[in-house]
């Protein structure tokens, strides 16, 4: 049987579509998420199956509950202790900061309405890494040492950090600190269960990713007596969403479009929790 | 005949002897193999002395395994390692590896010194954590 040119082309097209379709289907089935992993432990192994999971971790700061020095100190010290953060003294240029306090005009820069209540303008606010939805630090990192995880946490891989400090320049919140000197001698109370950092790397708040895996809330949240609330921004039933649904919360520098995951309840009666 | 041949050959001989002197000095001596010590309180307390992998696997591939652990835990948030036997372990250098292997000098360094590598794990990770 002789095949005409037109027939041949039609046949060819059909075969191509068939192959392509087959491939597409294959890809579709392969990219399907694997069936939920059973987290049952084999006897005698040491694995926590309580790990907390989220689509996007977020925090709500109830500023009305950060009034006294003690409120800030409790939270900061819990973080310092858990993460082996060195203490170079308050005025040192080597300061390492994971969670710290800033006055109103530095926390909410640009919100300088002259008719804001004086009380609010005089307040201090706890600030930390915002774990942005669109983190500029991740975009500029030349070695992918900093990255955004599937659960929304912006993490740091200190092994890959070359200390170029592009991320510090890119972060609009000043949430990153550089280790100009070996931090070990300056850690007052060393926590043996968490690594220290080394000279020449940038570090920042990690939303306690190591604790979330053990089913624990971040240390600052635990130490805050309810002033900090942590949860999944993607889950309408989570604690943070419940607060955000019923209260007016603001974020730092929203005009930059980084999409911070830390929300502040300012000036009101707080979450009333 | 080479001009000054005796001197040249004598010099060459001395040179070659110097060159292979380390080998000559060690002729007949047993090769001192590194002998990493498992004598730590945490390991002695174990009922079955079993690492996350077999001894042969850990000796050959612990560096690749550690890199894999680092990326898995840090970047993907998966802190559970399943070994070839199906056993599960928490991924943590501090809390899974070094709680048992708390003797850096007698365990890690014996081989690292022998093969002449100086990994910088200890600049951040804490050796022998809670001993």
Image: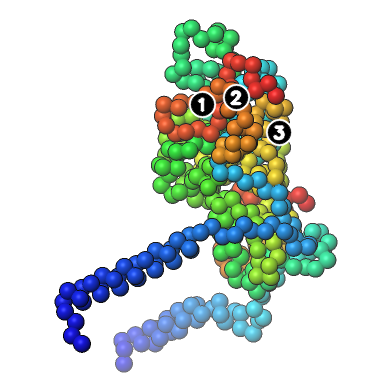
Tell me what residue is drawn at x 31 percent, y 92 percent.
Answer: B1
Residue A266, picture quadrant:
top right
Residue B98, picture quadrant:
bottom right
Which residue corresponds to mark 2? A246
Tell me what residue is drawn at x 61 percent, y 48 percent.
Answer: B124
Label 1 and label 3 in one chain: yes
Circle number at residue A251: 1
Of marks 1 and 3, the one in the foreground? 1
Residue B112 in view of the camera = yes
Of marks 1 and 2, the one in the foreground? 2
Percent of width and height locating residue A223: 71, 31
The image quadrant where one finds the N terminus of chain A is bottom left
Q: Earlier in the sequence, mark 3 or mark 2?
A: 3
Callout 1: chain: A
Percent of width and height locating residue A241: 59, 32
Callout 3: chain: A
Which residue corresponds to mark 3? A222
Tell me what residue is drawn at x 65 percent, y 29 percent.
Answer: A228
| Left or right of residue A16, residue A100 in this image | right
Of marks 3 and 2, the one in the foreground? 2
Callout 2: chain: A
């Amino acid at each position: 049987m002789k095949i005409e040119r037109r027939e041949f082309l039609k046949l060819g097209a059909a075969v191509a579509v068939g192959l392509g379709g087959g491939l597409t289907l294959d890809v579709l089935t392969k990219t399907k998420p694997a069936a939920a992993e059973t987290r049952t432990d084999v006897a005698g192994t040491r694995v926590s199956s309580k790990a907390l999971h989220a689509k996007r971790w977020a925090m709500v700061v109830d500023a009305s509950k950060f009034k006294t020095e003690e409120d800030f100190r409790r939270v900061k010290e819990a973080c310092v202790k858990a993460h082996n953060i060195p203490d170079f003294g308050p005025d040192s240029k080597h300061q390492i900061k994971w969670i710290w306090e800033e006055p109103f005009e530095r926390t909410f820069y640009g919100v300088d309405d002259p008719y804001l209540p004086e009380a609010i303008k005089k307040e201090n606010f706890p600030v930390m890494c915002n774990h942005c939805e669109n983190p500029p630090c991740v975009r500029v990192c030349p070695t992918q040492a900093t990255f955004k995880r599937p659960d929304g946490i912006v993490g740091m891989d200190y092994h890959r950090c070359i200390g170029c400090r592009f991320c510090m320049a890119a972060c609009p919140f000043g949430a990153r600190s550089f280790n100009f000197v070996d931090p070990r001698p300056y850690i007052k109370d060393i926590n043996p269960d968490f690594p220290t950092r080394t000279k020449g790397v940038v570090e920042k708040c990690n939303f306690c990713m190591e604790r979330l895996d053990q089913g624990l809330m971040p240390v600052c949240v635990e130490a805050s007596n309810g002033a900090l609330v942590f949860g999944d921004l993607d889950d309408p039933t989570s604690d943070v969403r419940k607060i955000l649904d019923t209260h007016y919360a603001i974020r730092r520098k929203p005009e930059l479009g980084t999409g911070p995951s830390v929300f502040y309840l300012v000036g009101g009666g707080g979450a009333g929790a | 005949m080479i001009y000054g041949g005796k001197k040249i050959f004598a010099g060459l001989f001395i040179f070659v002897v110097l060159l292979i002197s380390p080998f000559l000095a060690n002729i007949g001596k047993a090769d001192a193999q590194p002998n990493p010590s498992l004598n730590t309180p945490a390991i002695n307390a174990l009922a079955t002395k079993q690492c996350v992998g077999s001894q042969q696997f850990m000796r050959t591939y612990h560096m690749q395994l550690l890199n894999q652990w680092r990326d898995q835990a840090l970047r993907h948030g998966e802190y559970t390692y399943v070994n070839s036997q199906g056993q599960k372990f928490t991924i943590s250098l501090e809390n899974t590896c070094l709680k048992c292997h708390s003797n850096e000098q007698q365990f890690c360094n014996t081989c690292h010194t022998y093969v002449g590598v100086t990994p910088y794990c200890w600049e951040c990770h804490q050796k022998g954590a809670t001993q």
